[in-house]
Each structure stands twice: as C-alpha cells, then as structure tokens.
Image: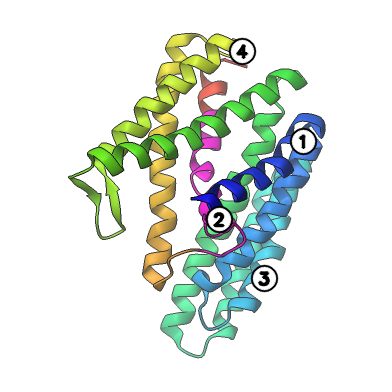
Amino acid sequence: MLQRIISGVVALAIVLPVLLMGGVDGAKVLVGAVLLVVMHEFGAVASPQRPRSAAIVMSVVGLSIYGVLSWGQQPELVGVVMVLGTAVLLTWAMFAHEDPKEAALCGAVTALSVPYIAAALAFIGLVRGFGSDELGLSWVLYVLVATWATDTGAYCSGRFLGRKKLLVRISPKKTWAGVWGGVAVAVAVSVGWSMQWSIMPLGHAAVLGGVLAISGVVGDLVESMFKRARGIKDSGGIMPGHGGLFDRVDSLLFTMPVAWAYAVIFGLV
C-alpha cells in the first residue's frame, strides 16, 4: 500500500504542474511521452517473440497518428496516416515472425490497438482544449478524478461487499458490487465537481459520471483481456505498487473520448 501511495504522489507531482501551467500544448507533449511508455510496455503483449522491435515500430506509428491528431491542420491526413501506419504494422508482423499464425495474431493486435491507443490518448489534449484555459483545465481534471474515483470506489466496495464475480475469465477479482460501488462514487464526484466548478448542469453531471464509470471499467477489462491472452499480470513496473503506466491509463482510453463526445453532443462546451 505504501508503494502505491508513493508512486501515486510522484506521478501527481509530474502530471499536475504540466496540466496546470503547461496549457494545451504542454498537456499534449506530456501525453505523447506517456504514449511512448505505453507502446514500450505493450510490446510484450503484441509480440512476446519480438517485444523490442514491436515497441519500436508501434512507437513510430503511434506517435505519427498521435501527432497528426494533436497538431495536424489537415483532417484528411488522419485517415492517410492511420491507413499507412496500419500497413506498416502488418508488414512488420509478417516479416518479423516465422510462424504465420503468430504473425497474423501480432498483426491483428497491433493494427487494432496502436491506432486506437494513439487516437484515444489524443482526446486528453482535445478535452484540455475545451473553451477557455480554465474551462479546459476543469474538464480534463474532472475526467481524471472521476475515472480514478471509479477505481477507488470499485476497489473498496468490491473488497468488502463483492461476492458475485463480473467476468472471471478476464479479471477474476472484479465483482458486480465493485462496479456499482465505482458508479456510485463517480456519480457523487461528478455532481460535487460540477457544483464546485459549474462545468455542466447537475443532471448531466450525474449521467456523465455513471457513463464514465462504466466506460472506465470496460477500458480496464479490455486491457486485462490482452494481458491474460499473453499470460501477463502487469504491463510493466514503472510505477511500483501499480504495475505499468498502461495499467494506470487503460480506463482513460475509454473515458476521455466518451467525455469529449458527451460534452460536444449535448453542447456543454
């Protein structure tokens, strides 16, 4: 527990100053660095036989997609870079693996996951760019806090009340009690945040809090699915007590795009 707390404090000491003082571009650069680490950690999942070369190829493709989405001025470039990047990943997988089955599996995993991870992380910068600097900061912090509050609520309620398992074949420890506990905490945090910072009406805050909680749980399960398929417990060890950095941002891959879409569709920004 002490390791988890220390790792969390160190991470916040790095992230918060950038989000508070770095503006939109500072947030985008920070997320780009996170993407590099995530691609390195995901190398062993994508290709146990060639983890280093997988990490290099995925990093190049992932950063290219992320850069176009974050700073590109021509929308058509997004599709071009994604298609070419996918072609690079599939070509690498074919030549890097002698077993056709492993090549096909690796190609499928990387072609699906790398564009998605890069694009999903880009939504952090998009949310940070909502409206004024103060509004964007309030929104990105809100999504971060709601996402991590879901984890805390799910952990506590699952530990003390959890009996019925959620999806044993993917994550044996997750329970339905944990899910609903996480939803309750996320809704409470969401409403409280909106009362304090007035970023949206309270009705929307309650609904979005619940939607973010469910999205975060699904995001966590999806990463667990990939790790379990490869027999891997943690994606890395960069954060003692937590595992890898990918283990900390997996939920954000779902919650940030969902928050952006909800805010834009309902005209909240």
Q: What stretch is highlighted in magenta?
A: 235-260
Q: Are marks 4 and 3 in contact (CB under 8 Å)?
A: no
Type of residue at label 1?
Pro
Mark-to-mark CA distance, 3 and 2: 17 Å
Callout in the foreground (1, 3) = 1
Percent coordinates x, y for residue 265 in the rendering = 52, 21
The residue depicted at 58 percent of the width and 84 percent of the height is: 96
Percent coordinates x, y for residue 245 in the rendering = 59, 55
Type of residue at label 4?
Trp
Which residue is under mark 1? 17
Sequence order check, earlier mark of 3 and 2: 3
**Residue 57 badge:** 3
The residue depicted at 73 percent of the width and 53 percent of the height is: 33
Percent coordinates x, y for residue 264 in the rendering = 57, 22
Residue neighbourhood size for the residue with mark 1, other residues' Cα within 10 Å, grouped as few (<14), some (14–19), many (≥20): few
**Residue 197 badge:** 4
SS state under label 4: helix
Callout in the foreground (3, 2) = 2
